[in-house]
């Protein structure tokens, strides 16, 4: 791989990874406070409001956030400026429209979830949606300009501000869930102002209709894909909230909190991976793009399955220490969701590579299929297994996507290495199976199993000596 490309890639990952990791740690402290000072029912309602807000953020995005990154990367300054101004104009209009729809939908939403707390605090939803929308957009714009340091700083500012304000509103003043909402909205607002000042284009509201038409045409399949992905990853929250209670949602959210935060850490990698892949495909360098894909899959799979193994071995200890013993019944769901995360990230890299190569439609088709499986799985299993039913449905759906994504990659002439993720998966299963067969909960045994995973990965060429110095140099075949 070209040294300048590799250096830029690794530098981008270093900035975004450090920012996301710091924000993730701060978010953990925030959650640790929230579950100790807010009831399960109130915490579940707060998380439900975030999911509803995210749904409308994606509805207003509809793929334009990814598109704006692609239109900014490597283009002349005049086109970059037009792109930024046009997308901000669109965002202002769509946010105002959707905010009105959110308010109009209050009777239907509060009736569906039958939560007095949600009804009382519903007025905060448009404010939360407004801040989340512009925060997500400005991340994509900064990503297009390769302003990874500023992206990381904004993440830390938002997470740190949220923690400080939560201490003030929730811990010191005792405002409960209302304090959580105030802290979230204020922290997002401050981060949005910082992001806006970091964009290397003077702000403006000059809308270019022709440019937006071209952008939106590219965005359509991405938008459908994003909505399907949201349905796949978040529909279980809606169904748990409607079929069980906010308390059941609180247990599920606690189980999914670490996997979700880990996904955010991966997103910092993806925010660098996607523009570099798109750049290499646009310059007709298939061999280099395939090497980047296969090595990324190999290393990400190794790391995420190591974390999944740790979650499997120490599930009870992790949940008890971070979320208190009141949430101990979330432990098994947590370990399964960490495994599901590892499988899901492989599929995400495959789908991202297809989009970067100019094929946005196949991921939509695959997501349609797995979303149907996920919805049916939730409908069947939540009534029988409670919130664990949603976990089972997620694992099955993530596994079902892989064969189709590999087929589309190979049919588009992209040489994907199946062994890049199958080998670490086999090592993971051997370690889990061995621990279960031994039937011991001894601490030293758990540490030994983690070490065995690394040793077997080295022995089977899952990882190499030079992987973490200049990473991604060796082909993963």
Image (spheres, rainbow, N blue to C red):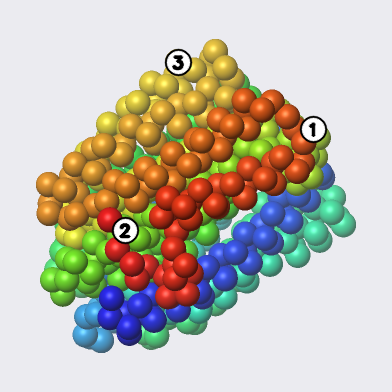
Q: In the image, residue 308 lies at what x, y percent?
A: 56, 43
User: Is tag 1's residue or tag 2's residue first in the polypeptide sequence?
Assistant: 1
Please state if 325 lies on the left or on the right of 42 as rendered: right
Local SS, label 2:
loop
Callout 1 touching callout 3 (CB < 8 Å): no
The earlier-in-sequence mark between 1 and 3 is 1
Residue at 39% x, 26% y is 375
- Left or right, 181 with reference to 428: right
**In which quarter of the view is residue 464 placed?**
bottom left
Give the residue pinned by disc 1.
326
Task: Label 3, secondary structure: give it.
Answer: helix
Residue denoted by label 3 = 380
Residue 476 tag number: 2
Which of 169/435 is in front? 435
Q: Can residue 293 be seen in this view?
A: yes
Q: Residue at x 31, y 79 (%)?
A: 5
Q: Position of 452 compared to 217: left or right?
A: right
Residue under the image location 63 percent in, 32 percent down: 435
Q: In this view, does 267 lie to the left or right of 338?
A: left
Asked whether the viewer can see residue 57, the reply is no
In the image, 202 versus 161, the foreground residue is: 161
Q: In which quarter of the image is residue 441?
A: top right
| x, y percent for residue 135 | 49, 64
Residue 273 or 241: which is nearer the viewer? 273
Q: Name which quarter of the figure residue 422 lies in.
A: top left
């Amino acid at each position: 791989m070209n040294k300048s490309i590799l250096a830029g890639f690794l530098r981008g990952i270093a900035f975004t990874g450090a920012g996301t990791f710091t924000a993730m740690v701060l978010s953990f402290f925030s959650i640790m406070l929230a579950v100790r000072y807010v009831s399960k029912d109130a915490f579940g309602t707060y998380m439900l409001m975030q999911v509803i807000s995210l749904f409308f953020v994606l509805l207003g995005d509809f793929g334009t956030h990814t598109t704006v990154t692609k239109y900014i990367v490597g283009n002349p300054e005049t086109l970059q400026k037009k792109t930024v101004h046009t997308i901000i104009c669109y965002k202002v209009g769509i946010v105002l429209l959707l905010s009105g729809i959110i308010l109009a939908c209050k009777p239907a939403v509060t009736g569906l979830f039958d939560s007095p707390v949600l009804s009382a605090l519903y007025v905060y939803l448009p404010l939360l949606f407004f801040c989340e929308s512009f925060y997500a957009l400005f991340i994509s714009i900064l990503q297009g300009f390769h302003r990874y340091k500023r992206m990381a700083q904004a993440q830390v500012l938002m997470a740190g501000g949220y923690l400080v304000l939560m201490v003030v509103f929730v811990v010191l003043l005792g405002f409960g869930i209302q304090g959580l909402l105030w802290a979230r909205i204020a922290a997002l607002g401050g981060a949005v102002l910082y992001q806006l000042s970091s964009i290397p284009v003077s702000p403006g509201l000059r809308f270019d209709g022709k440019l937006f038409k071209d952008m939106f045409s590219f965005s359509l399949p991405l938008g459908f894909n994003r909505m399907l992905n949201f349905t796949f990853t978040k529909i279980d929250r809606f169904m748990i909230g409607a079929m069980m209670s906010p308390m059941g949602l609180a247990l599920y959210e606690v189980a999914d909190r670490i996997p979700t935060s880990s996904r955010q850490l991966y997103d910092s990698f993806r925010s660098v991976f996607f523009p570099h892949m798109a750049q290499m495909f646009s310059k007709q360098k298939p061999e280099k793009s395939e090497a980047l894909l296969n090595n990324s899959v190999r290393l990400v799979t190794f790391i995420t399955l190591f974390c999944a193994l740790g979650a499997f071995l120490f599930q009870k200890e992790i949940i008890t220490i971070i979320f208190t013993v009141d949430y101990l019944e979330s432990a098994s769901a947590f370990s399964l969701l960490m495994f599901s995360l590892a499988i899901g990230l492989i599929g995400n890299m495959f789908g991202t590579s297809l989009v970067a190569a100019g094929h946005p439609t196949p991921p939509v088709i695959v997501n349609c299929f797995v979303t149907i499986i996920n919805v049916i799985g939730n409908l069947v299993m939540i009534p029988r297994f409670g919130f664990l039913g949603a976990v089972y449905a997620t694992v099955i759906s993530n596994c079902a996507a892989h064969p189709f994504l590999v087929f589309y990659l190979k049919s588009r002439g992209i040489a994907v290495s199946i062994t890049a993720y199958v080998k670490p998966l086999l090592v993971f299963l051997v370690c889990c199976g061995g621990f279960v067969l031994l039937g011991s909960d001894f601490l030293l045994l758990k540490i030994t199993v983690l070490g065995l995973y690394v040793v077997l990965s080295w022995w089977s060429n899952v990882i190499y000596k030079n992987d973490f110095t200049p990473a991604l140099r060796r082909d993963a075949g």
